[in-house]
Image (spheres, rainbow, N blue to C red):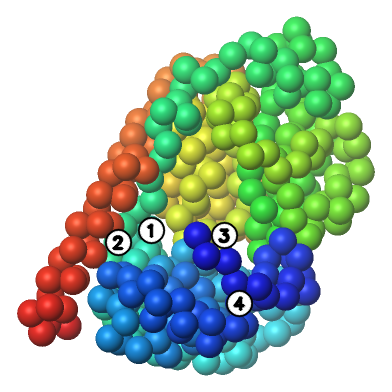
Amino acid sequence: MIRVRGPSSPYDPSYHLLLNTRKIREIVARERPDVLEIHSPYMAAVGALRADPSTYGVRTFQWHSDFIDTYGGVLEDKLPRLPAPLVKAATRPLWSLVRSIAKRCDATLVASAWQVGKLTAHGVANVVHLPFGIERDVFRPDARSFEARRELLALAGRDARDERTAVVVGVGRFAIEKRWDVVIDAFTRVRERGRDAVLVLFGDGPERERMTARARAVAGDVVFPGFTKDRAALARSLASADALVHGCPFETFGLSIAEAMSCGLPPVVPDDGGAAEMHDPASGEQYPAGDADACADALERLLDRVRSDEAEMRAAAARVAARLPSVGEQLERQVALYAELLVRRASGGT
């Protein structure tokens, strides 16, 4: 791993801006990689695109952050009177940028099938579907335990022996596009209707303080343990909860949902983005993206279903996740793709 110094992002200081494009070119020229991956459409892409083609084998574009839909969604949410055609016009140059990057790469990799369709429809070249993998030895149904459930209840100051209290969890970065406002507002409605439940939100980010303030209406029932690096501990929490609730309609895949379902946890997801692709009627509920009332209804339906047929719902969730590759299988597929691209490049193909 080679680190390049860069300033912190104004919005989220945990992210840094890769502004030194000259340094990127120098590193590529020195390391001479077989594959040069572009993971950002910003300055990192500028540096990678300026690298001398003689210093690497093939170049790929990894599309795992749908910034266009995010920006458009934020505009529509914050400025609801803004006409939809105007929002599309404002984001149209971004699609030109994406097409320009992809055109100069040997393949554009995306993790969900709906992203393949969308990018192809926008004229993005050489789109390849390569789903993300799950760490099955970590995120598994048998990670479930009474002790982990007791810990989740204790976070909210509840009696660990009380089986009537529903434990709902959410996992992700606290950023504006993740729509934790929808999740918290939906849960608040669920509590106001008399449902005995707690909401445990794992993660951190620039919106955490705002979301904590938003949850004050149900203070004590919504807790923020923060970001955890212990994936085994996170898996135990997921496997031991009753439901996952997700708010972001801009996911390019939805890895946190896949990992939760691999633990046998039934989810509530929006009907847009990669999260929607993870939906399975046998193991979860879906709601119109951005609609907190509908999210509350979906969460109540799910909790009722879990109470009446928990074993089958958990088994169904695990079956859906089992269709996805493991981390090792994903790596093997990606290496095989790169080997094919390198052979094609060596033979003069495109």
Residue that badge 2 annotates: 129
Amino acid type, residue under disc 4 in the picture: Leu
Asked if the residue under mark 1 is in contact with the one under mark 2, i.e. CB atoms within 8 Å, the reply is: yes
- CA–CA distance between discs 2 and 4? 27 Å
Q: Nearer the viewer, mark 2 or mark 4?
A: 4
Specify which label sits upstream in the sequence, 2 or 3. Answer: 2
Above or below, comparing residue 166 to residue 267 in the picture: above
Residue that badge 1 annotates: 111
Amino acid type, residue under disc 3 in the picture: Pro
Secondary element at image label 3: loop
Mark 4 Cα-neighbour bin, 10 Å: few <14, some 14–19, many ≥20: many
Mark 2 Cα-neighbour bin, 10 Å: few <14, some 14–19, many ≥20: some
Based on the displayed image, in which of its 4 quarters is residue 175 positioned?
A: bottom right
- CA–CA distance between discs 3 and 1? 15 Å
Q: Nearer the viewer, mark 4 or mark 1?
A: 4
Secondary element at image label 2: strand
Which disc number belongs to residue 249?
A: 3
Q: Nearer the viewer, mark 2 or mark 3?
A: 2
Residue in the picture at 60% in, 77% down: 18
Give the number of marks.
4
Based on the displayed image, in which of its 4 quarters is residue 57 positioned?
A: bottom left
Secondary element at image label 4: loop
Based on the displayed image, in which of its 4 quarters is residue 88 positioned?
A: bottom right
Which disc number belongs to residue 18?
A: 4
Residue in the picture at 54% in, 82% down: 23
Q: Nearer the viewer, mark 3 or mark 4?
A: 4
Secondary element at image label 1: loop
State the image coordinates of residue 242 (x, y, percent, origin top left). Answer: 61, 25
